[in-house]
Amino acid sequence: MILEVDLSLIESLAVLGAGAAAGAINAVVGSGTLITFPVLLALGYPPVVANVSNTVGLVPGSLSGAYTYRRELAGHGRLLLTLAIAAVAGAITGALLLLWLPSGAFDTIVPVLIGLALILVVAQPWLARRLAGIPPGEKHRPVGPLLLLGVYAAGTYGGYFGAAQGVLMVGLFGVLLSTDLQWLNGIKNLLTGLVNAVAAVLFVIVGDVAWEPALLIAAGSVVGGFVGGHWGRKLPRAVLRGVIVVVGLAAIANLLF
């Protein structure tokens, strides 16, 4: 049963603005949930309802952010399909965990997962040199079982909560797939968009969605996704890596404190 919350005009504008900011951050790196989710909690929505409604609302923004990277992703259909299957399977698992299990046990490991992702992002250039090199003329390493398992795990996390799943994916891809952060950011946007969309479908069918804030977040996130995707594509690798680290640390601080 959804707790009904009558939003004032100011509160509605706050949710709309949070959705726009989250859409922009998700397009650049991820963790937009850390903006919208606390806002819904502050307005009086129960945690699970806030999480479900937030996931549903951020789907359009995630997909609009992925659309801005269409040129980087062109010509990689087979790779994207392989990764998408693993991500979608994880999203279904994570969404079912949210609906069926208490959150306490899973929440304790979230800061650890984000911290590991940040270590991977920072160490990615060094690790890439230590690992087998990318064959000449190829953009990425072959997809192996470890990468697919990691994408499934990240999709599970994303289907359950979602904050910083982009950080996890970029860190994973940077070590096991490629050193091209802009290209990886495009893949991350596509996969996180799919994860959110699949989880949202399950939440609409089974869960309790507060539609007023969900639609406000959706409207804001579409605009934010286009803006963030446009400017995120122009960021140098070092700057993009720095943004990832800052957002990831903010995610850990938010979850711990």
Image: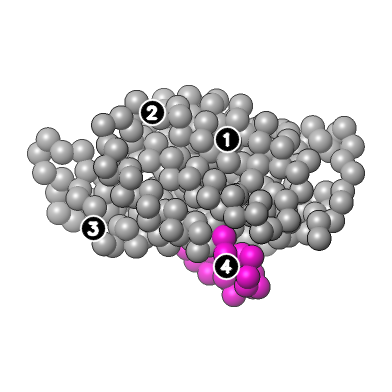
Pointers 1 and 4 in contact (C-beta within 8 Å):
no
Determine which of the numbered discs, if any, sits on residue 61 in the image.
1
Pointers 3 and 1 in contact (C-beta within 8 Å):
no
Answer with mark 1 or mark 4, whichever residue precedes in sequence.
Answer: 1
- Which residue is at a point 20% across and 38% down the rendered structure image? 139
Element marked by disc 4? helix
Where is mark 2, residue-wise?
70
Q: Is residue 35 magenta?
A: no
Q: Position of residue 179 (x, y in %)?
A: 27, 43
Q: CA distance from mark 3 to mark 1?
A: 30 Å
Q: Amino acid at mark 3?
A: Gly
- Which residue is at a point 10% across and 39% down the rendered structure image? 136
Q: Amino acid at mark 2?
A: Arg
Image: 35 above or below 117: above
Where is mark 3, residue-wise?
144
Classed neighbour count for the residue bearing mark 3: other residues with Cα under 10 Å, few (<14), some (14–19), many (≥20): few
Q: Amino acid at mark 1?
A: Gly
- Which residue is at a point 51% across and 59% down the rendered structure image? 92
Q: CA distance from mark 2 to mark 3?
A: 24 Å
Pointers 1 and 2 in contact (C-beta within 8 Å):
no
Q: Is residue 9 visible?
A: yes
Q: Amino acid at mark 4?
A: Leu
Classed neighbour count for the residue bearing mark 4: other residues with Cα under 10 Å, few (<14), some (14–19), many (≥20): some
Magenta segment's dominant SS is: helix
Where is mark 4, residue-wise?
97
